[in-house]
Amino acid sequence: MLPVYFSYSENTNNVLEIILDGKDGVDWDNTPNVKTIHVNGNPVALYDPYTRGMTNPLCGQIHVHTTNSDGSYPPKTVAAKMKEAGYDFWTITDHNFITPDPKVNDLIWLCNAYEDTRDTQHTNIYNIPALYNSNNINDIITHFVTNGNSYVMYNHPDWTPQFQPDTKIANVIKGLSFVEVFNITGTTETDRAFDILLSKGHRIWGVASDDFHNDSHLKKGWVVAYSASRDPNDIMQALLTGCFVSSSGFTVKNVELVGNTIKIDTGSPTAVTTFYKENMTALSTTTGKNAEYSITGNEMFVRAVIKEGNARCWVQPYFILSENTGLNEIDASNLKIYPNPFENILSITGAENSTLRIMNVIGVVVHIQKITGVNEPVDLQPLPAGMYFFCVEKDGQTKMVKGVKK
Ligand SMILES: [Zn+2]
Ligand SMILES: [Zn+2]
């Protein structure tokens, strides 16, 4: 997700229509973040935003105002306040004005940015060389995003006049990088807006921000980026690839994918973790230090929100890139292994002229064998005890049975 910008207009149903048309900074098919997991033996491709690990956390604020628009303090004073709040990196996003880095302390300046401000929509544009005057938002989009190297955040979507629950946003085409899931000057509807955009198939990341104007906004919402270094380009890369969490006062300790399971270490015995898939469908809710969810491959995406008291932490979505169609094709009526449980050697029936793949519980293929006969021996002496999935592929179909090694 990268460059791209949007135009908005009201369609005939009086619903905000946002049309993004441009580049998208993530190569969704070919990055280290794209992995293949196995669910019951069926391969599922997914995008894991935390592939590089949650190392080098850097706290950042990417929505800030000064007296160059409607903020209460001049840039240098704001810089001091950001530093005091404990932020490592920041940028200033004045309304229709690019405020340069005031350079008064060692805060990392992410990039030049501004908040494109119109009646119907506020949009932060990051990595911008200079303002471009046009009354037509499409021109601006084309100039900065399609032809340029800028990134876009859809700010406080709940403030958009046309924003109505359940009809809300009619359309957003790929390319938007961020949407605010939390904005101190916004309402609680922002998380729902994030869900709506994701459920429409848009691969975007949720950002929490202070939208700092005055002291009452400070340290209310921010991002924690896991960046390769303190170089602003690396931080931007972490943000664009989703390697960050958003916080309104609580930050998880760790998130990682093990096999097909997303494992969260909240670091707190009282934290409440809810995993969601599309349409705000809750998959599980867990109280405590550890929470996990095993991906089935039939979700569009899986994300988590962790609550600790009134504070929240938003874990970015894991996007399922290829649907797990195999799961629906399992028909084990005539596929059998025996004995089951087995010790070292078992026999398989109903699998003649197929390829047998045996996976362990985390989806790793541990044995492959061509099966020709009707009652073929399979030697599994080297495998450790445990549960295995026996998958046979035949005539384009996958069938699966479970077996247990004693
Ligand atoms: Zn705004
Ligand atoms: Zn603002």
Image (cartoon, rainbow, N blue to C red):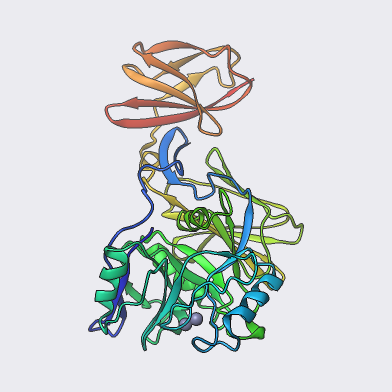
When the figure is inspected, residue 27 is found, relative to residue 74, above or below; the finding is above
Name the foreground residue: 128 vs 191. Answer: 128
When the figure is inspected, residue 11 is found, relative to residue 50, above or below; the finding is below
Q: The N terminus lies in which quarter of the figure?
A: bottom left
Residue 111 position within the rendered picture, expressed as x and y whole percent measured from the top left: 48, 66
Q: Is residue 153 left or right of residue 218?
A: left
Name the foreground residue: 391 vs 156. Answer: 156
When the figure is inspected, residue 261 is found, relative to residue 154, above or below; the finding is above
Residue 386 position within the rendered picture, expressed as x and y whole percent measured from the top left: 62, 26
When the figure is inspected, residue 133 is found, relative to residue 348, above or below; the finding is below
Q: Is residue 255 visible?
A: yes
Q: Is residue 267 left or right of residue 261?
A: right
Name the foreground residue: 330 vs 156. Answer: 156
Residue 367 position within the rendered picture, expressed as x and y whole percent measured from the top left: 48, 19
Q: Residue at 43% x, 23% y: name it.
A: 357
Q: Residue at 66% x, 66% y: name it.
A: 307
Name the foreground residue: 369 vs 70. Answer: 70
Q: Quadrant of residue 168?
A: bottom left
Q: Is residue 219 visible?
A: no
